[in-house]
Amino acid sequence: MKIKRNTKAIYLIENMENGRIKIGVSDNPSKRIKSLMSQGGCLMTLRYESHQITNFSKIESDLHSMFVESRFVGEWFNIDLKEAKNAVKRLVKNRHDCLIIRHFEEGKPIGEIAKFNNVSRTAIVNYLLSKGFRPKDRNGKTAKKIVYKPAEPYNVESSISNDKIAKMVELNNKKIAEKRSKINKLKNEKPA
C-alpha cells in the first residue's frame, strides 16, 4: 500500500507595522504572503517556512493552542519570533519522527518510508535503530547500524592497461573523424 502524500509548510509571517506573527499553513508560503499583503494593505515578511510536511493541520492547531494566551485575533499572535520558530521546529521534528515510526509499525517498506521522507534508506534504518526498533533488511535479517565510510579511490592503471587506453582513444578518434566527415558532406551537398 502506497503512502498518501498531501503536504504543506508551516509558516511564520510578521506584520512589519505592528510586529504581530501569523502562524499558518500553505503549500506555497511566498504566494500566501502576497495575498495577505494585498488583502491587509500592509507590509509583511515571511520569517520562517518549514519543509513540506503531511501532518500540517495538527501541528498548526498545536501551535495555536501553545500560544493561545498571546492570540491577537485569528491566526495572529503577539509573540516573540525566536520562540515561535523554535516551537515550530520542535513540533515539526517530533511529528516527523512519529510519522516514521508509525509507518514502520504499519509494515511499510523501508524504501517507501525513505522515499516519502526524501531521505536515504540508510538514514531511516539508522534512525529506527537509534530508537530501539529492529528493522529487517531485504533478506529478512535484523539490520545493523550502517556506518558511512569513504569509497576506495579507483586506480585506473591497475584495471586498464595503457595499451587498452590507447586503443580506446584511437577508436574514439576514428568515430569522431567519421562523424565530422559525414557532417562536412552534408554541408557541401546543395539542395536540388
Image (spheres, grey):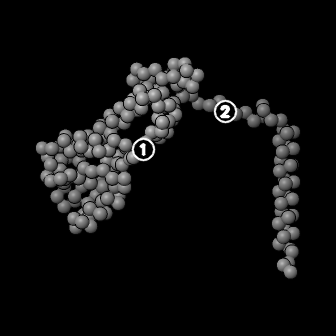
Image position, residue 63 (x, y; %) = 23, 42
Looking at the rendered structure, the secondary structure element under dot 2 is: loop
Q: Residues within 10 Å of mark 2 (few under 14, many from 20)?
A: few
- Give the residue drawn at x 66%, y 32%: 153
Q: Please state which of residues 3 and 41 is positioned toward the viewer in this rendering.
A: 3
Q: Residue at x 26, y 62 (%)?
A: 36
Q: Which mark is residue 5?
A: 1
x then y, percent, for residue 39: 24, 66
Going by the numbered disc 1, the residue's amino acid type is: Arg
**Residue 82 is at least partly visible in this image:** no
- Residue at image location 52% in from the left, 34% down from the top: 111
Q: Secondary structure at mark 1?
A: loop
Above-or-below relation of 181 to 152:
below
Identified by mark 2, the residue type is Pro
Asked if marks 2 and 1 touch (Cβ < 8 Å), the reply is: no
Disc nearer the start of the sequence (2/1): 1
Q: How many marks?
A: 2
Q: Position of residue 48 (x, y in %)?
A: 31, 49
Q: Is residue 42 left or right of residue 160?
A: left
Give the residue displayed 86% in from the left and 80% down from the top. Answer: 192
Q: Which mark is residue 153?
A: 2
**With respect to residue 165, does 40 lie above or below?**
below
- Residue at the outermost top position: 141
Q: Is residue 147 visible?
A: yes
Is residue 86 depicted above or below 121 in this figure?
Answer: below
Indicate the quadrant where residue 161 lies: top right
State the image coordinates of residue 55 (x, y, percent, origin top left). 33, 41
Q: CA distance from mark 2 to mark 1?
A: 40 Å
Nearer to me, 144 or 99: 99
